[in-house]
Image (tube, helix red, strand yellow):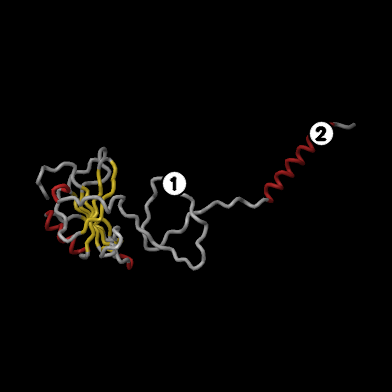
Amino acid sequence: MFCPRRVIAACSTAIVLVWAAQASAQPPVARPQPPPPVTGTTTQAPATAAPAQPAAQPAGQAATARVQPPADANTEQAPTDAMLGVRIYPAAKYLGSYDAGRGQRYYLFGTMQPFAEIVSYYRSELKDKGELVFDVPATHMFDLGRFREEAMAFPPSVTIKDFTWNGSPGYANPKPGVTPTAFPTVIQIVPPETAPAGQIR
């Protein structure tokens, strides 16, 4: 006896199997991948989604390493010792500042002096041994005040970092066309929350 329900069920099953076979036969859609990092550079996570990058560079073009300067490195006025609450190494060049969040800023200074000499200077200046927080790259930190986690993004401090590790020429000067082109040592200052006028540590 002819049963239309069985035929409909069999046809439906066959159609589903044909769709599944066609779907598996199609190649997967390629998803764009980010380019690999360039050796010897540091990267930071962007605040917003970056525009799509080309899939590949034309043959013969070498990748160029770029260091992003502070947004206002060329126009921002250099801070003074009194503003920062600590003496700035006399031969250091002001590189600019970054927003650390929660009303704090990182102030960066580059110097041609070696890492050990700058650490020794701040040990004497601050009457504090500080702490070697990283061996590689060598990074030494001096506290300038109490860190309040609920109100601060970063501890008030002087941090010195050696940028010559792994054969690097140093931290690239964010101001184009001036010398030096790179600084072996960088001093980062996050001022204390409050400092009486004229008081310098």
Q: In this view, does 141 lie above or below 59?
A: above
Q: Which amino acid does label 1 sit on?
A: Ala
Dot 1: element = loop
Position of 135 compared to 145: left or right? right
Q: Residue at x 15, y 48 (%)?
A: 85
Read off the residue under disc 2: 6
Whether residue 136 is visible = no
Residue 129 visible? The answer is yes
**Residue type marked 2:** Arg
Q: Earlier in the sequence, mark 1 or mark 2?
A: 2
Q: Mark 1 points at which residue?
A: 49
Position of residue 93 measured from the top left corner of the image (x, y, whole percent): 21, 58
Q: How many labels does the image show?
A: 2
Residue most extreme to the right: 1
Residue drawn at point x = 22 percent, y = 65 percent: 112
**Residue 37 % position (x, y):** 43, 59
